[in-house]
Image: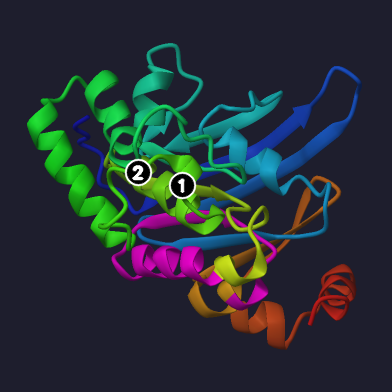
Amino acid sequence: MTRNYQGDDMIVATNVNKIYPNQCHALKDVSATIKRGEVVVIIGPSGSGKSTFLRTLNQLEVISSGAIQVDGMDMYAKTTNINDLRANVGMVFQSFNLFPHKTVKGNVMLAPEKVLGRKKAEVELEAEKLLKRVGLGDKMNVFPSQLSGGQQQRVAIARALAMKPDVMLFDEPTSALDPEMVGEVLDVMKDLASDGMTMVVVTHEMGFAREVADRVLFMEDGELLVGDTPEHIFDTPKHPRLQQFLSKLL
């Protein structure tokens, strides 16, 4: 999808609230701006609203009030085609959600062929390049059940990249993995970050946040309490709740 917008702000969330029917106030006036090419990591305790906020950025969660712009598009404008917007925002979940009856390459090819209507031959070439990029060039024709969890998550990342998104969202992409498989997924994410991909990552991997993030957002009880550089977040945290949170992890 072509875009004319070339502003610095890739995502602008303004006073975002999410209230569920049971009156759970999951997001409370959350405002954040993610710049083009920026890597932003969201941290916080379980239930703080991290994943809920991430899911509002492609309307997997519909906000109760506020505004969200992605790549210059008002997500809730009547003229906005949400499917077009989602095609520009890749997402990787905790669970891999691969189609078990399709090969690894078939999983990566599916959306560009079916959603974008692109020609099979060119999609196949791109899928092969992406799978080589994530270190799975030798696994293209096997099925997901033949892969480790870390390998399956790397396929899921390649699948999201196949849509050529301008933004990638990661919702705790390593939390379902065995510890020895975490590194291989984080390495792929670091590679993406070094290439200038705009990324918003919810994670408990503080080493990744410290090393790769341009900014770290700390959430608690549905509120965005702190947004700062990794150095300020981890080395000189000033907010008492952030200090308490980090003291249990570091």
Q: Label 2 to label 1, Cα distance in Å?
A: 7 Å
Kindly check if marks 2 and 1 are in contact, taking CB atoms under 8 A apart as contact. yes
Start-end of magenta stretch? 183-207
**What residue sits 70% from the left and 64% below the top?**
204
Judge by depth and name the residue closer to the eye, 86 or 80: 86
Q: Residues within 10 Å of mark 2 (few under 14, many from 20)?
A: some
Asked if the magenta segment contains residue 30, the reply would be: no
- Residue 155 in picture, x, y percent from top left: 40, 48
**What residue sits 33% from the left and 71% below the top?**
194
**What residue sits 39% from the left and 55% below the top?**
198
Q: Residue tagged by mark 2?
A: 142
Which three-letter amino acid code belongs to the residue tagged 1? Gln
Is residue 199 left or right of 180 when viewed as pictured? left
- Residue 29 in picture, x, y percent from top left: 74, 41
Is residue 130 left or right of 56 when viewed as pictured? left
Asked if residue 174 is positioned above or below residue 2 in the image, the reply reads below
Asked if residue 226 is positioned above or below residue 244 in the image, the reply reads above
User: Considering the numbered disc 1 on the image, is that residue within a helix, a strand or a loop?
Assistant: helix
- Residue 190 in picture, x, y percent from top left: 42, 69
For residue 34, say whether it is visible. Answer: no
- Residue 93 in picture, x, y percent from top left: 57, 43
Which three-letter amino acid code belongs to the residue tagged 2? Val
Is residue 188 left or right of 124 when viewed as pictured? right
Question: In the rendered view of the protein, which quadrant contains the N terminus?
Answer: top left
Q: Residues within 10 Å of mark 1 (few under 14, many from 20)?
A: few
In which image quadrant can residue 102 be found? top left
Judge by depth and name the residue closer to the eye, 181 or 92: 181
Q: Residue tagged by mark 1?
A: 146
Judge by depth and name the residue closer to the eye, 178 or 18: 178
Question: In the rendered view of the protein, which quadrant contains the C terminus?
Answer: bottom right
